[in-house]
Amino acid sequence: MTRERRRWLTVVAAAGLALVLVALGAVAGVRWWRESQRTDLQRALAWAPEGSARFSWTDWDAVRSQLDTQVDAQSSGLEVAELLNEGYDADLTSTTAMGESAEVLQERFGFSPATVSWELLSQSETGSVMTLGLPDSYDFDELASTLESLGYDRPDSDAGVWVGGAELVATIAQGASISPQLSHVALDRDRGLVLTSDDEGYLAEAVEALDREQGGGDVEDVAVEAGDAVSAVLLDSAQVCGGLAMSQADEIDQQAADELVAAAGDLHPLTAFALAAQPDGEVLAVLGFETEDQARTNADSRAQLAAGPAPGQGGDFSERFTLGDVTADGTVVTMHLEPVEGAFVLSDLSSGPVLFATC
């Protein structure tokens, strides 16, 4: 082989390698960009077990900021309980699964509403798991030592389940209130997560689901529109069409609802639903549909329902919120609700019956 040919092959190889590196860099850049666009809520949903149908989200960093509280790891259990009370009064923390356990968590576990970044409770027909996002500075070695000292059985691997049980958590609480959701614990140091459940087997499944990142399911699109929610409830189609159904109302209210629905025009079944409290105090009602045409049609018909009487809830929706813009974007309809002072829009309308969320 001549010197010129060797030089030519070297140039070609170098150019090919450069193209490969550029392509790999482009792929990595796209992945980075997509990840940077996801909210904490979207990431948390992706980590939930597949088949989860109801999600309750609390952004504790945002809650503490909204309430302008100074609670931290050194605060007393009573101070954390007061944080919960203030949060309930502001309709920001009805979504938490840590409420009844807050004092015990603060005083004995080393994490609580005073210290975690966010919380997602994922529920399905087979179980539930509470996932907590911890700050980057959190000491997981210290937490592991705490769990062991409390009596949880240390797993064989870092990704295993710390087995406790109902009797153990009752002993830990020493007569105080504590949720069975804390019966078993798992730690994910790489992602900065703590997971808990009352079912050891389901918690193990939840840990395995983290790597698949397929837990959002039907609620992914409404979660995008929910934005940087301070707190939120998200339901898949079965949950919203059952949990918020007008069939829960009495016969007179059902009849009134039928008349209002008939007058509103075409309605189509929901594929998903979310109520999401925003940092500015607004609440978004986000409704998912099968097609863009259905979304455009339902933007009008459901806006009419949201501006009128609230059979099953009592009175009119206008006594709870002022209806703002209602927009259809793709297959999703977003309603902007401005809560009336003293109204509890998120907590009241995340359980049925809710006329404008009817299927």
Image (cartoon, helix red, strand yellow):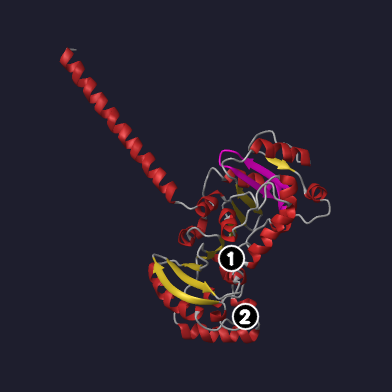
Q: Quadrant of the N terminus?
A: top left
Vertical arrangement, residue 98 with respect to residue 312, above or below: above
Query: Per the image, is 191 magenta?
Result: yes
Q: Is residue 72 magenta?
A: no
Q: CA distance from mark 2 to mark 1?
A: 18 Å
Query: Which label number is shown at residue 312?
Result: 2
The percent coordinates of residue 201 (x first, y second) are 69, 46
Asked if residue 24 is positioned above or below residue 310 in the image, the reply reads: above
Residue at 75 percent across and 38 percent down: it is: 148
Q: Is residue 72 left or right of residue 267?
A: right
| Mark in the foreground, 2 or 1 | 2
Question: Would residue 306 be seen by someone viewing this image from the given angle?
Answer: yes
The answer to whether 93 is drawn above or below residue 34 in the figure is below
What mark, if any, has residue 239 been given in the picture?
1
Q: Residue 17 at what x, y percent from top left?
A: 29, 28
Region of the chain picked out in magenta, as a range: 181-202
Q: Position of residue 65 (x, y in %)?
A: 57, 56
Compare residues 139 and 73 and report the one nearer the observer: 73
| SS for callout 2 | loop
Residue ID at (64%, 76%): 248
How many numbered marks does the figure carry?
2
Query: Residue 106, position in %: x, y?
Result: 71, 49
Amino acid type for the residue under numbered disc 1: Gln
Label annotation for residue 346? none
Question: Are the residues flagged by discs 2 and 1 in contact, CB closer than 8 Å?
Answer: no
Q: Amino acid under label 2?
A: Gly
